Image (spheres, rainbow, N blue to C red):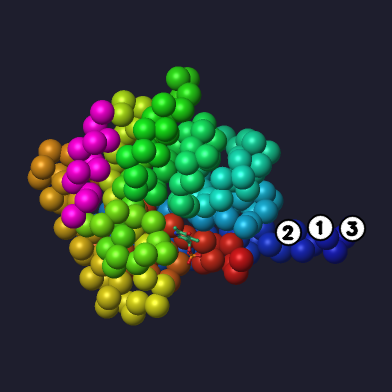
Amino acid sequence: MDSIANSRDQSVTQITDHLAQVRRRVETAASVAGRRTEDITIVAVSKKQAATAIAAAHAAGQRDFGENVVQEAVSKITAIELPGIRWHFIGRIQSNKTKAIARYFDWVHTVDRFKTAQKLDAQRPHYAAPLEICIQVNLAGEPQKGGVATDEVLALAAALKELPRLRLRGLMTVPPLDADLTTTGAAFRQLRELKSSLVAAGYPLDTLSMGMSGDLEAAIQNGSTMVRIGTAIFGPR
Ligand SMILES: *Cc1c(COP(=O)(O)O)cnc(C)c1O
């Protein structure tokens, strides 16, 4: 019993420390970029992590959590009821999972098809606020990855206007895994420019969801407002 309790305390301390380190990285990157830390939200990516790890991060002040597998997420979301917690869906949207996504999540970062967006809109419960969404953009045209092509973003944004239960907040991207920081930085800059062009076209977007454990500095330098951080907070999966 004691050793279990100890190892649990240890992991709580570790998550608290890691979270403090990530917050410092965000602060430093914001300051280097001449931006305000308050304009950047850390989404703690808790996929494959236990409910106890989520509770530890919540106790350390973390409120936004990201998950990418619906079933795993729903079992945690329904088990953990912590005040002020916000759930972000960051995985591929399968059309037979839209109902659960619409019901349990506050944000969806990975909208890339009008058809699934229509289902999310129709299935968002009436008692809940509109679902906050981002269009995922596949900048490098990677076939195995979700996201719309750069030249399809405007058309999807226009179509989403007719879905009142969804609120388009911005754009999201995941750069190629093997890209170096220069290439990744260029991708982040490209997403920012794409968002600016949508703003110029009359879409009031305020969100750029980009940056993970390894590249949050490059993302913040290029205007990220939401960094999605897993391993740097929770350790390896
Ligand atoms: C897993 C995941 C992350 C977090 O990645 P880390 O490198 O662990 O910080 C961010 N975004 C998406 C879409 C993910 O699937």
- Horizontal and vertical percent position of residue 56: 63, 52
159 inside magenta stretch? yes
Q: In the picture shown, does residue 169 fall above or below 119?
A: below
Q: How crowded is mark 2: few (under 14 residues within 10 Å), some or many (20 or more)?
A: few
Quarter where residue 204 is shown: top left
Which secondary structure, mark 3? loop
Q: Residue 9 carries which label?
A: 2
Amino acid identity at mark 1: Ala
Q: In the picture shown, does residue 209 fall above or below 131?
A: below
Which secondary structure, mark 1? helix
Is 199 positioned to the left or the right of 54 in the image? left
Q: Pointer 3: what residue?
A: 1
C-alpha gap between disc 2 and disc 1: 6 Å
Which secondary structure, mark 2? helix
- Horizontal and vertical percent position of residue 153: 22, 49
Circle 3/circle 1 CB separation < 8 Å: yes
Which region shows up in magenta? 151-162
C-alpha gap between disc 3 and disc 2: 12 Å
Amino acid identity at mark 3: Met
Q: How crowded is mark 1: few (under 14 residues within 10 Å), some or many (20 or more)?
A: few
Is the CB of mark 1 within 8 Å of ligand 1? no
Amino acid identity at mark 2: Asp
Q: Residue 5 carries which label?
A: 1
Q: How crowded is mark 3: few (under 14 residues within 10 Å), some or many (20 or more)?
A: few
Q: Between residues 43 and 3, which one lies in front from this camera angle?
A: 43
Circle 2/circle 1 CB separation < 8 Å: yes
Q: Is residue 11 shown to the viewer in this render?
A: yes
